[in-house]
Amino acid sequence: MQLRRIGRSPLETAPIVFGGNVLGWTVDETNAFKILDAFVAAGFNAIDTADTYSRWIPGNKGGESETIIGKWLKQGGGRRERVLIFTKVGHEMGPDKKGLSRRYIRAEVEESLKRLQIETIDLYQSHRDDISVPMQETLETYAELMREGKVRAIGASNFTAARVREALETANAHGLPRYECLQPRFNLYDRADFEGELEQLCLKENIGVIPYYGLASGFLTGKYRSPADFAKSARGSRMGDYLNPRGRRILTALDEVAAAHQVNPAAVALAWLIARPSITAPIASATNIDQLKDFSAAAELRLSAGEIAKLDAAGA
């Protein structure tokens, strides 16, 4: 499978990154091990998680996803050597446990390393912006972690174009590592946050982009066609936001392109992202092994210019 370099970093990822937000939520440890093994066996090599996954579940405290990944890696068999591990810091883990200060990052990276049972995080990302902390302090902290061998490259998630630009200028002015990767919300339906200034900045500065919600929480798989379908999964309650005239136009276009290639709509939705020049690799989750077939199909699918234009127009 053709690998894609993330920004100017040494990291190279297959065209789809596994979204670890489901681990410890809708996927238990036993099934997680099976899914991750199948994901790697299919030729993929990158897993994205965060310290807070899955803190939103009653009884969870955060760190569940990292813990499952750590146990999976600990089984050996060359698993650590075959995958890149991406995680994040900054989102709230508790009332006084959040942000991008030196104190917090230094403490929280140790917790993530412990849960993941690894010595080095391949891509460490600022999960959300923190305007209360000077940009230089955050980047200097990441520089320390890179010198210590605890982090290989850094990225940012949910940053505006202005703040990404400020981070780049700060890194350049002070000889600090720059954010090599951006993780925005972006898919065929959710386009407003990334299209335009932010996308153009990433292209200009050669910043890798690994968008989350690549399948719009499952809406773009096509399994939610009416309110009666919302009970199909734990994410179904979110589908009311998507099931509107624009959402239905997108599903119709996905159905048409999918039929032409004899694949599922999910494969087309991911292939649309993969084909976009600004995108390095979309993040997508799977809750069973069968769903990984859509990942493989997407990685192989080559959409025509006309098909991409049809999908663009449907989701405009």
Image: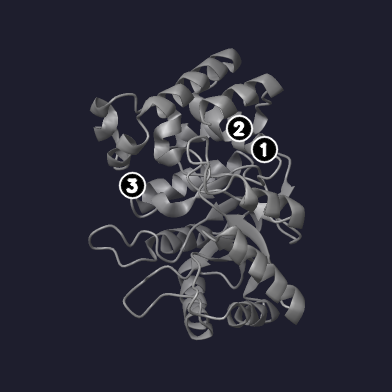
State the SS at label 2: helix
Residue 159, image x and y in percent?
55, 61
Give yes or no for contact between labels 2 and 3 (Cβ–Cβ under 8 Å): no
- Residue 276: image tag: 1
- Residue 272: image tag: 2
Pick whichever, 98 or 112, lies toward us: 98
Q: Is residue 304 visible?
A: no
Q: Residues within 10 Å of mark 2 (few under 14, many from 20)?
A: many
**In-image side of 124 versus 61 (left or right):** right
> In the image, is residue 229 above or below residue 206?
above
- Residue 20: image tag: none
Give yes or no for contact between labels 3 and 1 (Cβ–Cβ under 8 Å): no
What distance separates the C-alpha of mark 1 from that of mark 2? 7 Å
**In-image side of 253 versus 32 (left or right):** right
> In the image, is residue 78 above or below residue 26?
below
State the SS at label 1: loop
State the SS at label 3: loop
- Circle 1: residue type: Arg
Identify residue for label 3: 26
Q: Residues within 10 Å of mark 1 (few under 14, many from 20)?
A: few
Q: Foreground mark, 3 or 1?
A: 1
Q: Residues within 10 Å of mark 3 (few under 14, many from 20)?
A: some
